[in-house]
Structure formats: C-alpha cells, structure tokens
Image: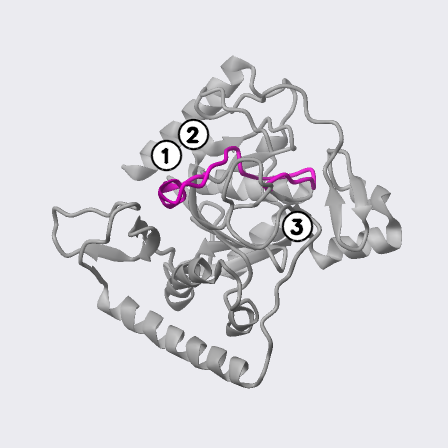
C-alpha cells in the first residue's frame, strides 16, 4: 500500500510539473538515470536501484554519504561524495539569514524535490523540523543542490547533484515515502568529541551522536522523535496514549532491548576513548572558518588549476575569496522565485 502511495505521489508530481511548466521543455536533467558504474556497484553489494536510501552529511570533513538498503535489510555505504561548498560554521542553524547549514535529522519526500532549481537540481531538507521549531530556530529553503555555491545549503557539483537526485528518484519510485538525512558537524568519533568538548554546542552534538550511534550499531535508519527539547531514537512511549512533543517533557518511554544494548556498548567504548584522549593532555580547540568550507579535493583544484576548472563542474557563477579556504557567494542572485515541481505550493528554491 505504501509503495503504491509513493508511486502515485511521484506520478502526480511529474504530471503537475509538466502541466504547470515547472520543467523547461527539453530539459531532462532531472531524468538522468543512475550511472551504470554506480548501478554495478549496487549489484556487487546486493542492492537494486529501487532500494531505499539514507544520506549522512559531515560538515568538518565536507563529505556526504549515500547509504542504501541491501538484501539483508540493513543499510550499507554505497558512495561518498565530496561537498563542494557549505556555509557558516560548525553548529546548528539558529535563525533566518545566519548562513548556517542545518544540523539534525530530517526527512525528504517527493514534494521536497525540485527538478527546476536555480542551482541545477535540489531537494529541501525540511528545516525547521519539530525540534528546530521547539528551540526557536528559524529559516527556510535549506537544500542539498548543485552549482557549488551556498548560503545555508550543502552545495555539490552539478554532476554530484544529478547523481543524488537520480538515486532519490529511484528510491521514491521504488516505494520509499521519504528518506532520512542525518546532518552532523563532524564524524561522531571520540577524537572529534574530545577536540570540540569546549564548544557551546557540545550538549546538542552529544544528542546528535545518540542518533548516529543508533544507526552505526544497527545499520538501519533510527526512528526519530523529539521531546524535552531533544531528539529521542527508536523510542516508544510506555503509555499507548502518550505522545512525543518536542517542546514538552518526555513521557516514560522504552527503547527496544536489543538495540539499546548495542547502542549502550558503543557509547561506553566511545566515552572511555574520550576520557583517554582528554587525560593525554589533548587541548580542546575551536575551528572558526572564514565562511564554511569545502572538500580538500576542490581546494586542490583551486590551488593547482584555478577557479576556471571548478567552474567547469558547475552551472552557477564561481567567485573565489580565498583559494585555500572557501568559495564566496555569486554576486548575481538567480532571478525570481522558482516553482517547486512537487506540490504546487509555490515555494521558491531560494538558497
């Protein structure tokens, strides 16, 4: 039933887009298939193109991972993409206009995908989610898109954006109603937690790590809820009539015993390692970026070949402020709101 529902939504989405003129005539960029090499990689890992996906994003490392369900029912890493540009600094998005890329757990559905984006192809992360709203965080149109230019988004090359769009489209066609995006400040390792232990965001980051641990322990997307102004994972209220509310204290809840044991064991190992690192005398540090960062592979392109080479990988203007650190924003903004292909809401792809 869910599969038929997802296919119906997707078919309706494409029809609405065509009738409304949201997709430029002759422009088939959103229909590019998954590359044969990537399909072969799936097959070698016991996956099909229609199997569900999950995305993990790591700011500090400027990497985006696509995970895909395999024949075992668990998720395995399919491919890691370098992020061409992200803006802001390590830490969650707090308010509209702060140029921060979001951190948290989000779900992307068919009506959040935009084949006619001003930045090649895009999908909206769904910020703010319930927890963001409970914490008073504001912002809109936070995307993963192409064009290698960011004002609060995760920007890929156009080729990377096309692959991600194709993977998401096939998963939705296959019946996945929405895929999870996990956005982290960095890989949730003991080394990174020890290094960033003095950050004002450390309590929030430790809460994000709980979700990361649930995924890494089970290799299945955690069921995400929020209560008491924090995330809870794979949790069910003890009272069947109770519910989770992001802004209200958590009701008594239970996490499935097997999952809870695996997560607790991982957390105990990681905490012991953090204590060991701190005891060794490693100082806490704070990374302050000029404005976000980019994957080292793109910095190498800028250093050795200049911005023209990077421009060849994108559809948008590329302006470099400091070649060794980051790309600046394009001076000319895209003209006018861009209609969303999916729901006819008229929401623009503004970043």
- Quadrant for the N terminus in the image: top left
Q: Is residue 44 above or below residue 313?
A: below
Question: Which-is-in-front pick, marks 2 and 3?
Answer: 3
Label 1: few (<14), some (14–19) or many (≥20) C-alpha neighbours in 10 Å: many
State the separation of the CA atoms marked 2 and 3. Answer: 34 Å
Q: Is residue 176 left or right of residue 238?
A: right
Q: Seen in the image, is 238 located left or right of residue 321?
A: left
Residue that mark 2 sits on = 10
Q: Residues within 10 Å of mark 3 (few under 14, many from 20)?
A: many
Q: Is residue 55 above or below residue 312?
A: below
Instruction: Say whether residue 286 is visible.
Output: yes
State yes or no: discs 2 and 1 in contact (Cβ < 8 Å).
yes
Closer to the camera in the image, 154 or 30: 154
For label 3, the residue is 292
Q: Is residue 175 visible?
A: no
- Who's the residue at 59% across and 26% down the image? 116
Q: How is the image coloured?
A: one colour
Residue in the picture at 51% in, 20% down? 17
Per the model, the C-alpha gap separating discs 2 and 1 is: 6 Å
Nearer the N terminus, badge 3 or badge 1?
Answer: 1
Question: Alpha-carbon distance for marks 3 and 1?
Answer: 36 Å
Identify the mark at residue 6; answer none if there is no mark: 1
Q: Nearer the viewer, residue 287 or 81?
A: 287
Question: In front: 282, or 303?
Answer: 282
Q: Is residue 142 left or right of residue 229?
A: right
In the rendered image of this protein, does residue 40 appear above or below residue 175?
Answer: below
Label drawn at residue 154: none
| Residue at the spot 47% in from the left edge and 54% down from the top edge | 68
In the rendered image, the vertical position of residue 17 relative to residue 165, given as above or below? above
């Amino acid at each position: 039933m869910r599969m038929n529902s997802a296919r119906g939504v997707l078919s309706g989405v494409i029809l609405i887009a065509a009738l409304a003129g949201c997709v430029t005539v002759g422009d088939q960029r959103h229909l590019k298939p998954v590359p044969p090499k990537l399909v072969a990689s799936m097959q070698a890992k016991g996956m099909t193109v229609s199997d569900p996906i999950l995305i993990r994003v790591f700011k500090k490392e400027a990497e985006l991972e696509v995970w895909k369900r395999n024949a075992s029912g668990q998720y395995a890493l399919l491919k890691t993409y370098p992020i061409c540009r992200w803006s802001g600094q390590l830490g969650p998005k707090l308010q509209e206009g702060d140029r921060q890329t979001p951190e948290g757990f989000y779900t992307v559905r068919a009506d959040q995908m935009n084949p006619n984006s001003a930045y090649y192809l895009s999908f909206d992360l769904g910020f703010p989610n319930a927890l963001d709203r409970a914490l008073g965080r504001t912002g809109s149109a936070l995307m993963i898109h192409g064009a290698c230019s960011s004002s609060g988004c995760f920007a890929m090359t156009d080729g990377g954006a096309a692959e991600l769009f194709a993977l998401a489209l096939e998963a939705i066609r296959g019946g996945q109603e929405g895929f999870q995006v996990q956005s982290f400040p960095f890989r949730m390792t003991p080394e990174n937690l020890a290094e960033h232990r003095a950050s004002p965001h450390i309590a929030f980051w430790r809460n994000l790590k709980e979700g990361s641990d649930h995924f890494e322990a089970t290799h299945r997307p955690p069921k995400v809820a929020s209560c008491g102004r924090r995330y809870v994972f794979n949790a069910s209220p003890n009272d069947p009539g109770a519910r989770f509310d992001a802004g209200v204290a958590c009701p008594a809840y239970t996490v499935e015993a097997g999952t809870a044991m695996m997560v607790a064991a991982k957390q105990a190992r990681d905490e012991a390692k953090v204590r060991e690192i701190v005891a060794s005398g490693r100082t806490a540090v704070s990374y302050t970026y000029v404005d976000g960062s980019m994957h080292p592979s793109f910095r190498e392109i800028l250093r050795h070949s200049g911005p023209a080479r990077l421009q060849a990988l994108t559809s948008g203007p590329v302006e470099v402020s400091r070649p060794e650190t980051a790309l600046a924003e394009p001076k000319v903004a895209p003209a006018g709101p861009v209609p969303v292909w999916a729901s006819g809401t008229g929401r623009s792809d503004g970043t």
